[in-house]
Image: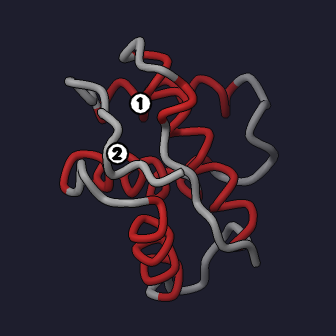
Amino acid sequence: MSSASLSIPAVIDVDAEVGHWRQRHADGTLGAGSFGHYVPWIKFACDSLITQPRASDEQRDESFQTHYALQIMPRLSEEQARDFVEQCWEHVYRAGRQDLSARPRLGARA
């Protein structure tokens, strides 16, 4: 299903998202790598919702692929980055008390 007709949360607090994921990293739930490896993907997830609220899942996937391709020495594999972006979207939707089934999904898989 395309997310183009679905609503996004009215407020997306990027700093709160970074804080949430920083805590998850400190708890050990994001793996052993540096938290800095995740920050670009938190910002991508939030930015994609803020700047393109009516984008389809396909458009978001294309944007993700472009963003990933532009990474210099990416620290997460494409699959890890995809999974993490979707986790970020899920958290944004939970925090905004939105319908989780309405959150965006990345279609293409590495």
> Does the image show residue 31?
yes
For label 2, the crowd category at 10 Å Cα-Cα, with few meaning under 14, some 14 to 19 and many 20 or more, is: many
Q: Which residue carries the number 1 mark?
A: 17
Q: At 50% across and 24% down in the image, what residue appears? A: 20
Report the disc number at residue 46.
Answer: 2
Residue type pointed to by label 2: Cys
> Does the image show residue 22?
no
- Examine the rendered structure and indicate whether residue 75 appears above or below residue 12: below
- Examine the rendered structure and indicate whether residue 56 appears above or below residue 19: below
User: Tags 2 and 1 in contact by the CB under 8 Å rule?
Assistant: yes
Residue 97 located left or right of residue 9: right
Lower sequence index among marks 2 and 1: 1
Q: At 22% across and 46% down in the image, what residue appears? A: 50
Mark 2–mark 1 distance (CA, rounded to whole Å):
8 Å
- Examine the rendered structure and indicate whether residue 95 appears above or below residue 106: above
Q: Position of residue 95 (x, y in %)?
A: 43, 16
Q: Position of residue 23 (x, y in %)?
A: 59, 23
For label 1, the crowd category at 10 Å Cα-Cα, with few meaning under 14, some 14 to 19 and many 20 or more, is: many
In front: 70, or 83?
A: 83
Q: Report helix, strand or loop for mark 2.
A: helix
Give the position of the C terminus as an image quadrant: bottom right
Q: At 31% across and 59% down in the image, what residue appears? A: 55
